[in-house]
Image (tube, rainbow, N blue to C red):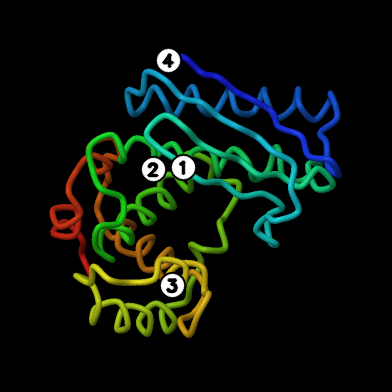
């Protein structure tokens, strides 16, 4: 697999040479592993210094396409985030990239929930030392969230940021938690196969 990593700067924020080296090494190690699992031939990463990150982790990720991933990292928090969190984000986003090769990420709410559930469960499997807060729930909480989700599963007109980021009336990370729960109920999940499987077929394997 060919891997390209590009670092950006801003007027106010900049990575040190040491930080660039550490981040590069982490991307190369974990992106190579994940890329080989999914049979990817090309991945491009852009890494930029920013304060607009997930407050619990000090970083964030976004998959632009099947071969382009953006990572945002707070330069003041790299001591904890680079080795302890960023690998998990790499696995999460590459799972999205693999799925976007053939499938629509969020045509329906179910599509988005399955996509985020697969990515969350995959990062958990590949980098278990980090437990993503968007994949943690109690039985009482997930029962409540599932009831909300069940009434909107096939919706096409939905607000992603409300369902997944809590930017609205819904609980923060609702879609992530429901997705993670659904995928975790599948016995011995083969992520390479599930990632290119239509959402309704993945949902049919769920054991609620």
The outermost residue toward the front is 11
Judge left or right: residue 206 versus residue 121.
left
Mark 2 vs mark 1: give the one in front.
1
Question: Which structural element holds mark 3?
Answer: helix
Coordinates of residue 135 in the picture (x, y in percent): 48, 62
Which quarter of the picture shows residue 96? top left
Q: How many marks?
A: 4
Question: Which structural element holds mark 4?
Answer: loop
Which of these two is toward me, 96 or 82? Answer: 96
Label 4 and label 2: CA atoms lie apart by 17 Å
Q: Earlier in the sequence, mark 4 or mark 2?
A: 4
At x 56% / y 46%, what residue is drawn? 61
Which quarter of the picture shows residue 71? top right
Q: Earlier in the sequence, mark 4 or mark 1?
A: 4
Residue ID for mark 3: 174
Q: Earlier in the sequence, mark 2 or mark 1?
A: 1
Question: Which structural element holds mark 1?
Answer: strand
Which of these two is toward me, 145 or 151? Answer: 151
Mark 1 vs mark 3: give the one in front.
1
Label 1 and label 3: CA atoms lie apart by 20 Å
Indicate which disc residue 1 carries: 4
Label 2 and label 1: CA atoms lie apart by 7 Å
- Is 185 located above or below residue 154 in the figure? above
Residue ID for mark 2: 96
At x 41% / y 45%, what residue is drawn? 122
Coordinates of residue 25 in the picture (x, y in percent): 67, 23
Question: Which structural element holds mark 2?
Answer: helix
Label 2 and label 3: CA atoms lie apart by 18 Å
- Is 35 located above or below residue 191 in the figure? above
């Amino acid at each position: 697999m060919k891997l390209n990593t590009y670092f950006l700067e801003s007027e106010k924020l900049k990575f040190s040479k040491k930080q660039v080296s550490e981040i590069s090494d982490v991307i190369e190690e974990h992106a190579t592993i994940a890329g080989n699992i999914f049979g990817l031939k090309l991945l491009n990463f852009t890494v930029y210094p920013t304060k607009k990150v997930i407050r619990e982790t000090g970083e964030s990720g976004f998959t632009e396409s099947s071969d382009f991933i953006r990572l945002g990292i707070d330069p003041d928090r790299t001591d904890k985030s680079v080795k302890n969190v960023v690998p998990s984000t790499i696995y999460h986003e590459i799972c999205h990239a693999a799925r976007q090769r053939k499938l629509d990420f969020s045509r329906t709410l179910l599509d988005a929930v399955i996509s985020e559930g697969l990515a969350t469960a995959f990062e958990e499997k590949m980098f278990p030392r980090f437990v993503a807060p968007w994949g943690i729930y109690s039985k009482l909480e997930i029962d409540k969230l599932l009831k909300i989700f069940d009434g909107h599963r096939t919706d096409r007109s939905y607000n992603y940021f409300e369902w997944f980021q809590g930017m609205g009336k819904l609980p923060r990370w609702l879609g992530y938690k429901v997705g993670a729960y659904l995928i975790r109920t599948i016995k011995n999940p083969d992520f390479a196969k599930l990632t290119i499987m239509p959402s309704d077929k993945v949902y049919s394997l769920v054991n609620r």
